[in-house]
Amino acid sequence: MPEGDTVWRACKRLDQALGGQELLRTDFRVPSLATTDLSGRTVLEVVARGKHLLMRLSGGVTIHSHLRLEGSWHLYRPGERWHGGAEHQIRAVLETSPWTAVGYRLPVLELVATDREDTVVGHLGPDLLSPSFDRATAIANIEADPERTISEALLDQRNLAGIGNFYRVEVCFLLGLHPWRPVKTVDVPAAVDLSRRLMKANLRNATQVSTGVNRPGQRTWVFERGGKPCRRCGTTILTGQLGEPTRERVTHWCPVCQPEVAPDSRPDTASN
Ligand SMILES: [Zn+2]
């Protein structure tokens, strides 16, 4: 599933391939853009904002897309066979002389004036992968809702932009946090700093790694390892759903390494 670092890598590839090139042909296969022709414009740059892709063109136009769970952009040389999906899954074709970019299954694809990009990404919190990441604001945004679960707070792109399910699940494990722990019991700066460190470390990897071991079956601590033994203590990893109706709600955790109550705090009411 695309997260901030995945989108960042996709943008970098698109930027290197298309940046400075003139669009020779464009073909948008969504109803709202069916008659749009952007040929003749130059691709200025392709940048990531959280999990959003912004392709900035000459003339003050930006192509905004979001991959969500299923979308992807592919790059092909002239004459190369396209293999990103079925023909009917193609949403956009951007042809330049050296490369053609093909967008498959893009759930969000629209044009926005470049000076009005805020209307599509302005709701996002500080971008974890931005060199000017506003750490204090990100922490304050999360701490503003102390009763919320840390899982939901980390996924909420209005708090901070870029974290998806992989980092949410792995950060909770690495900090020994049960995913349902309320924000008020969590060291929020540590969670923010670790998320950023892991994402930045993965910018050069083709796949996401949190264990430091980039080999199949060894890349994650608990993410997508439900039913398997914890790498640290051997306990069976559990799988559960977050309460809010979001498409990224499946979570995994080790019941021993990630206790429901902070080890140094006492529950308010008596329990077993
Ligand atoms: Zn464990």
Image: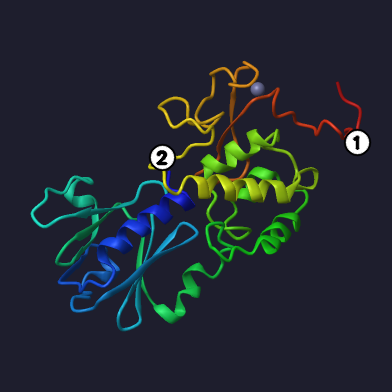
Q: Can residue 107 be seen here?
A: no
Q: Is residue 130 visible?
A: yes
Please tell me whether residue 148 is drawn above or below residue 227 in the rendered image. below
Residue at 36% across / 54% down in the picture? 10
Which residue position is annotated with label 1? 268
Residue 82 percent across, percent down from the top left: 16, 49
Of the image marks 2 and 1, the number of the one nearer the N terminus: 2
The spot of residue 53 in percent (x, y) is 40, 62
Residue shown at the point (41%, 43%) measured from the top left: 205
Left or right, 206 with reference to 189 = left
- Quadrant position of the N terminus in the picture: top left
Viewer-nearest of labels 2 and 1? Answer: 2
- Residue 196 in the image, given as x and y percentages of width and height: 58, 51
* Disc 2 to disc 1, C-alpha distance: 42 Å
Which one is in front, 205 or 268? 205
- Near mark 2 (Cα within 10 A), the count class, few <14, some 14-19 or many ≥20, is few
Quadrant for ligand 1? top right
Which scheme is used to colour this image of the protein?
rainbow
- Whether label 2 touches label 1, CB < 8 Å: no
Secondary element at tag 1:
loop
What is the number of the mark on residue 18?
A: none
**Residue located beneath label 2 in the image:** 207
In the displayed structure image, the side of residue 81 where residue 47 appears, left or right: right
Horizontal side of 205 relative to 101 (left or right) equals right
Q: Tell me the SS state at disc 2.
A: loop
Along the line of sight, the residue nearer the viewer: 110 or 206: 206
Indicate the amino acid at tag 1: Asp
Q: Position of residue 204 (x, y in %)?
A: 42, 47
